[in-house]
Image (tube, rainbow, N blue to C red):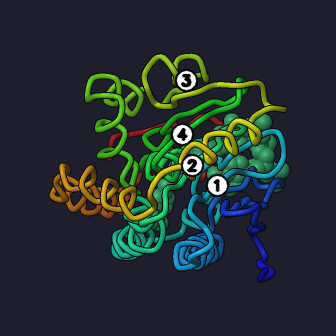
């Protein structure tokens, strides 16, 4: 197995496992992590001996606490749009359209880009301590990795609108109730539950599963994703974005002016 700086990969029979491994930053996604995830997903997808992929976060606290705020806070509008497009292509759209089914095992905070990675996965299960949310508007930006589209697809527009506009987190039971995850287990049992789910998938035809993923995904329009990318880029040019990200780093409450 290849050594990466930010992720760990291993296999168990026909299951490929990817663990995002930046626990000190709560597994936040920086550019390098996104590139490594792309490579790991791509390699498992091409490997004929791997028929299910599980993605999780290291440590007991976080799946992924979002995009790396300290990295993206200095991007401008053009970089913002470009990076949103690149990130989608490399990771979020990429995972959603993989032939091999992906199970997200959400072991703690799944926020912003972290929840968006789980939303792009085909199946989501969570530990009972997990917290999920799209806090982007509290930073002066919008979800830019497909969150405005996929959250509404999965839990419905009304609940998605409330989660995105309040920027609040929901707990695992609410996520189960919303259909955002399909199973909640104690944290110590999360990987067992993920592997049990994987075993159920492994009983079926990989080819038929890849066709099914393609067919299910075909129902959703791409126009919304383009609008999201444009508005995400525009948000990067606002004073509110500067204030929101600076306030996070300075550990204070943001004072938005609406500019
Ligand atoms: N980025 C960078 N560092 C992070 C981080 C993040 N998203 N989340 C946490 N950390 C770091 C903290 O800064 C802290 O580092 P040190 O101060 O120890 O150096 C360390 O992880 C531990 O975090 P806390 O001390 O804050 O831990 P607490 O238990 O007190 O709080 C928390 C846990 C998850 C509630 C809190 O850390 C938190 O609110 N984190 C931020 C959540 C968030 O707002 N995430 C970002 C959402 S926005 C883009 C496309 C898409 C996006 C961005 C760019 N481009 C195309 C450019 C998407 C944006 C998002 O994901």
Question: Which label sits on residue 103?
Answer: 2
Q: Position of residue 156 (x, y in %)?
A: 28, 28
How many labels sit on residues?
4
Q: Secondary structure at mark 4?
A: strand
Q: For the residues marked 3 and 4, what is the alpha-carbon distance in whole angstroms?
A: 15 Å
Residue occupying image coordinates x 35% and y 35%: 154
Q: For the residues marked 2 and 1, what is the alpha-carbon distance in whole angstroms?
A: 6 Å
Q: Position of residue 91 (x, y in %)?
A: 48, 67
Residue occupying image coordinates x 40% and y 53%: 239
Task: Kindly indicate whether the residue at mark 4 contacts the one at mark 2 (C-beta within 8 angstroms).
Answer: yes
Task: Kindly indicate whether the residue at mark 4 contacts the one at mark 3 (C-beta within 8 angstroms).
Answer: no
Q: Earlier in the sequence, mark 3 or mark 2?
A: 2
Residue occupying image coordinates x 67% and y 38%: 109
Q: Residues within 10 Å of mark 1 (few under 14, many from 20)?
A: many
- The N terminus: image quadrant: bottom right
Query: Which is in the foreground here, disc 1 or disc 3?
Result: 1
Q: Secondary structure at mark 2?
A: strand
Q: Earlier in the sequence, mark 3 or mark 4?
A: 4
Q: Position of residue 256 (x, y in %)?
A: 44, 38
Q: Name the residue beneath numbered marker 3.
A: 170
Q: For the residues marked 2 and 4, what is the alpha-carbon distance in whole angstroms?
A: 6 Å
Q: For the residues marked 3 and 2, what is the alpha-carbon distance in whole angstroms?
A: 20 Å
**Residue at the limit of the structure toward the bottom, as seen here:** 2
Residue 212, picture quadrant: bottom left
Q: Earlier in the sequence, mark 2 or mark 4?
A: 2
Q: Name the residue beneath numbered marker 4.
A: 124
Question: Which label sits on residue 55?
Answer: 1
């Amino acid at each position: 197995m290849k050594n990466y700086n930010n992720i760990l990969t291993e296999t168990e029979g026909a299951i490929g496992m990817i663990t995002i491994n930046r626990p000190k930053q709560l597994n936040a996604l920086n550019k390098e992590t996104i590139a490594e995830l792309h490579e790991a997903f791509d390699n498992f997808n091409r490997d004929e001996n791997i028929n299910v992929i599980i993605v999780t976060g290291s440590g007991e606290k976080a799946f992924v606490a979002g995009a790396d705020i300290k990295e993206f806070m200095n991007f401008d509008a053009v970089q913002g749009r470009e990076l949103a497009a690149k990130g989608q292509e490399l990771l979020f759209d990429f995972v959603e359209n993989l032939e091999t089914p992906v199970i997200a095992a959400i072991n703690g905070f799944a926020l912003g880009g972290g929840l968006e990675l789980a939303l792009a996965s085909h199946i989501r299960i969570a530990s009972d301590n997990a917290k999920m949310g799209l806090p982007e508007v509290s930073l002066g930006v919008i979800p830019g990795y497909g969150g405005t589209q996929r959250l509404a697809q999965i839990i419905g527009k009304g609940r998605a609108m409330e989660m995105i506009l309040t920027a609040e987190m929901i707990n695992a039971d609410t996520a189960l109730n919303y259909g955002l995850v399909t199973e909640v287990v104690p944290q110590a049992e999360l990987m067992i539950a993920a592997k049990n789910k994987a075993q159920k998938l492994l009983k079926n035809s990989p080819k038929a599963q890849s066709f099914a993923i393609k067919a299910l995904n075909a129902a959703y329009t791409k126009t919304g994703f383009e609008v999201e990318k444009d508005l995400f880029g525009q948000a990067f040019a606002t004073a509110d974005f500067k204030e929101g990200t600076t306030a996070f780093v300075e550990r204070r409450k943001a004072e938005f002016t609406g500019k």
